[in-house]
Image (cartoon, grey):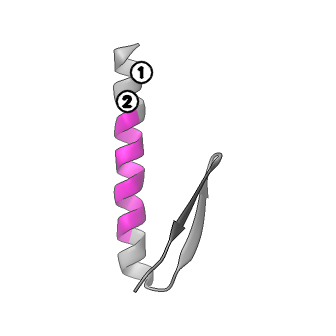
Amino acid sequence: MDRHRDRAERRYVQAVKALAQVRKLLGPSIQVNIGRNQVNVAGG
């Protein structure tokens, strides 16, 4: 069970890092939907 949680956490961290990178590349605010989670990213 711990391995499953570790893998899920690793995927989550990778997704957060990818969103941060996208935010830097795009600049203006975007909205990203991942599964049931809605993530609003505001650029500036």
Snapshot quadrant of residue 6: top left
Q: At 41% from the left edge and 44% from the top edge, which residue is drawn?
A: 12
Q: Which residue is mark 1?
A: 4
Give the amino acid at mark 2.
Arg
**Quadrant placement of the C terminus:** bottom left
**Which residue occupies the foreground of this view, 21 or 37?**
37
Crowding near the residue tagged with mark 2, few <14, some 14–19, many ≥20 C-alpha atoms within 10 Å: few
Q: Which mark is residue 7?
A: 2
Q: Secondary structure at mark 1?
A: helix
Crowding near the residue tagged with mark 1, few <14, some 14–19, many ≥20 C-alpha atoms within 10 Å: few
- Does the CB distance between marks 2 and 1 fall below 8 Å? yes
Above or below, 35 against 30 in this view is above
Number of numbered tags placed on the structure image: 2
Q: Position of residue 24 (x, y in %)?
A: 35, 77
Q: At 49% from the left edge and 86% from the top edge, which residue is drawn?
A: 28
Range of the magenta residues?
9-21
Query: What is the C-alpha distance between the residues marked 2 and 1?
Result: 5 Å
Q: Position of residue 5 (x, y in %)?
A: 40, 24
Q: Position of residue 29 (x, y in %)?
A: 52, 80
